Image (tube, grey):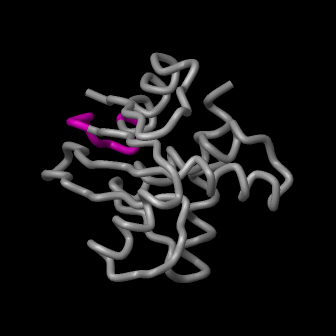
């Protein structure tokens, strides 16, 4: 089950379509969908998690906690709406495009994709772009 939770005023308008899109990506990557929680929040909320759990005192757009068991994807994906808005402006893309990219990025990490090296980052971007094109 994919659930969407809100710790801010933000609300998705198309939860069902996005849930289906994410589930399709998981299946396409050879995994099954377990419990995935998206939590939309602000910078302060995500900063506190970053400090508490990762010992990073920096702002970020996404933090994901991976509870995947074998081939079943499970996890919590925290997304700062403030960071997504700023990044959309910086990268000159729409807010929705940037939000969707971040949402699929978290799931791709659960599927085993990394982004620490240039090669890994290029592969991650390629996968993001592929799934973004599937969203319609």
In this view, the residue farthest toward the right is 92
In this view, the residue farthest toward the left is 69
Q: In which quarter of the image is residue 122?
A: bottom right
Total of numbered circles in the picture? 0
127 sits to left or right of 32: right
In the depicted structure, whether residue 115 falls above or below residue 29: below
Q: Which corner quadrant holds the C terminus?
A: top right
Q: Residue at point 55% right, 59% down?
A: 61
Q: Say if the magenta span includes residue 123.
A: no
Q: Position of residue 98 (x, y in %)?
A: 68, 47
Q: Residue at point 19% right, 54% down?
A: 67
In the depicted structure, whether residue 58 falls above or below residue 9: below
57 sits to left or right of 88: left
Q: Which of 15 and 119 is in front in this view?
A: 15
Q: Which of 82 and 31 is in front in this view?
A: 82
In the depicted structure, whether residue 18 falls above or below residue 128: above
Q: Nearer the viewer, residue 87 or 127?
A: 87
Q: Position of residue 41 (x, y in %)?
A: 46, 47
Residue range (magenta): 27-35
Q: Where is residue 92 in the image (x, y as percent from the top left)?
A: 86, 53
Q: Residue at point 72% right, 41% down?
A: 95
Q: Where is residue 115 in the image (x, y as percent from the top left)?
A: 51, 72
Q: Residue at point 44% right, 67% down?
A: 47
Q: Which corner quadrant holds the N terminus?
A: top left
Q: Say if the magenta span includes residue 31.
A: yes
């Amino acid at each position: 089950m994919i659930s969407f939770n809100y710790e801010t005023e933000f609300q998705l308008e198309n939860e069902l379509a996005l849930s289906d899109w994410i589930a399709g990506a998981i299946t396409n990557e050879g995994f099954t969908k377990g419990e995935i929680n998206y939590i939309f929040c602000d910078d302060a909320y995500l900063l506190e998690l970053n400090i508490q759990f990762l010992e990073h005192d920096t702002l970020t757009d996404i933090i994901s906690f991976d509870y995947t068991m074998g081939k079943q994807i499970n996890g919590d994906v925290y997304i700062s709406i403030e960071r997504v808005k700023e990044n959309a402006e910086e990268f000159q893309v729409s807010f929705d495009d940037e939000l969707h990219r971040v949402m699929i990025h978290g799931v791709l990490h659960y599927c085993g994709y990394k982004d620490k090296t240039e090669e890994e980052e290029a592969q991650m971007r390629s996968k993001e772009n592929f799934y973004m094109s599937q969203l319609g």
